[in-house]
Image: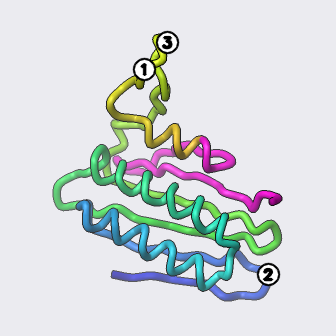
């Protein structure tokens, strides 16, 4: 496993890690993210939001983006000037682009049995989206900025 954190003055702080496309890899992504966020000394509320977003995106990479024999990548980038954290989870399956399901069906019951994780991501992140990762993968990204108390 390789990770890189840049510490250049005025530069973004970056963390990158390849992880196995397994449930253990998804759990490790969350734990590594929390460790990195603590080294950046972010507020507990921002750390908690980013932790939940990483957990959802990593779980989705393992469940829906897994390609046998291929890892997924977790990337975190802190922009010190704004305190914004960008989360990027890249997997090898670009044919399955995530779409959030409705949290509730029109009759008030819970909607789809899957896809609600992205509803959570939408609620916790300030914005999120996807982009192709050539030759055949995709990156799902989310940004979380500090919020006033």
Residue 145, image x, y percentages: 73, 59
Of circles 2 and 3, the one toward us is 3
Task: State whether residue 112 is above or below residue 2.
Answer: above
Of circles 1 and 2, the one toward us is 1
Q: Quadrant of residue 84?
A: bottom right
Question: Which residue corresponds to mark 2?
Answer: 10
| Front residue (pair 75, 95) | 75
- First of labels 1, 2 by sequence position: 2
Residue 41, image x, y percentages: 67, 82
Question: Which residue corresponds to mark 1?
Answer: 109
Please report the residue visible at 75 percent of the width from the left and 62 percent of the height from the top. Answer: 146
| Front residue (pair 121, 74) | 121
Which range of residues does the magenta coloring cover? 123-149
CA separation in Å, label 1 and label 3:
7 Å
In the rendered image, the quadrant that contains the N terminus is: bottom left
Q: Secondary structure at mark 1?
A: loop
Q: Secondary structure at mark 2?
A: loop
Please report the residue visible at 48 percent of the width from the left and 17 percent of the height from the top. Answer: 108
In the rendered image, the quadrant that contains the C terminus is: bottom right
Question: Which residue corresponds to mark 3?
Answer: 106
Residue 85, image x, y percentages: 65, 64
Q: Is residue 127 magenta?
A: yes
User: Dot 3: few (<14), some (14–19), or many (≥20) neighbours within 10 Å?
Assistant: few
Q: Quadrant of residue 58?
A: bottom left
| Front residue (pair 57, 93) | 57
Q: Is residue 143 magenta?
A: yes
Of circles 1 and 3, the one toward us is 1
């Amino acid at each position: 496993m390789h990770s890189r954190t840049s510490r250049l003055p005025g530069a973004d702080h970056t963390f990158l890690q390849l992880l196995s496309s397994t449930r253990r890899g998804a759990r490790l992504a969350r734990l590594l993210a929390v460790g990195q966020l603590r080294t950046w000394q972010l507020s507990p509320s921002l750390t908690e939001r980013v932790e939940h977003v990483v957990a959802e995106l990593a779980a989705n990479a393992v469940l829906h983006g897994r390609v046998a024999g291929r890892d997924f990548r977790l990337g975190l980038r802190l922009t010190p000037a704004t305190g914004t954290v960008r989360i990027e989870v890249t997997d090898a399956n670009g044919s399955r682009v995530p779409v959030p399901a409705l949290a509730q069906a029109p009759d008030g019951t819970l909607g789809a049995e899957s896809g609600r994780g992205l509803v959570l991501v939408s609620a916790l992140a300030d914005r999120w989206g996807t982009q192709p990762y050539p030759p055949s993968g995709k990156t799902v990204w989310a940004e979380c900025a500090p919020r006033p108390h």
